[in-house]
Amino acid sequence: MQRSGLLASAALRVMHPELYWAGLKTLLKLGNWAEEQNDEELLSRLRHWASVFNVATVMCNRTTQPHRDPRCPPEAFDIMTSIGPYGPAWMDISNFGIRLAYNSGTMVATCCRIARHAVDVNSGDRIMWAWYMRDTVHNFADVPRPPYARRM
């Protein structure tokens, strides 16, 4: 889990540096808050959290129906990675007319609040990590939303 989090964070650092720094700042402020509150459980979790994203979802052998993630900030990238020995898989981003080969080891970054996405896997074993951020966590830590990513 930590390696996946580090890899997704490194990719975000390149793709959207302002979001990367906002995520890191949020986690640091949460750590300071937890220390002030003497919340040892949260501090312990944060010490082992190896990602600038504040949410992770792990799914195994699941086909996902077309959906959007309305609680994610529109300026944010979600990063999804899939690994395992499985047959052909496809990620459809239907409202943009995009269909991607989603083979083992593929990493996809998109704004899942805007992009309607689905994954279809026919056979085999697969683990998928989705790394993303929630506005509520950034708001609690008083870290403003970064702007949309810009091409540099």
Image (cartoon, helix red, strand yellow):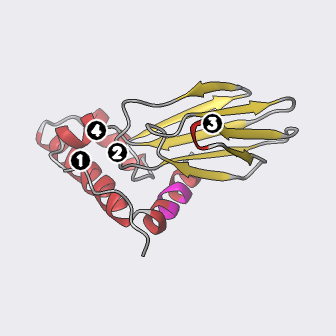
Q: Which residue is mark 2?
A: 46
Marks 2/1 in contact by CB < 8 Å: the verdict is yes
Mark 4 secondary-structure assignment:
helix
Give x and y (percent) for residue 48: 42, 47
Q: Nearer the viewer, mark 3 or mark 2?
A: 3
Horizontal side of 10 relative to 133 (left or right) equals right
Q: Earlier in the sequence, mark 2 or mark 4?
A: 2
Q: Is residue 81 above or below residue 92?
A: below
Q: Residue at x 88, y 38 (%)?
A: 87
Which is in the foreground here, disc 4 or disc 3?
A: 3
Q: Nearer the viewer, mark 3 or mark 1?
A: 3
Where does the image place residue 51, in percent across and percent down from the top left? 44, 52
Residue receiving disc 3:
94
Q: CA distance from mark 3 to mark 1?
A: 39 Å
N-terminal label among 1 and 4:
1
- Between the C-alphas of marks 3 and 2, the distance is 36 Å
**In terms of sequence position, does the residue under pointer 4 or pointer 3 come before the other?**
3
| Residue picked out by circle 4 | 135
Question: Which numbered marker is on residue 90?
Answer: none
Tell me the kind of residue under disc 4.
Asp
Q: Secondary structure at mark 3?
A: helix
Residue drawn at (16%, 37%), measured in percent from left and top? 38
Amino acid carrying mark 2 in the image: Leu
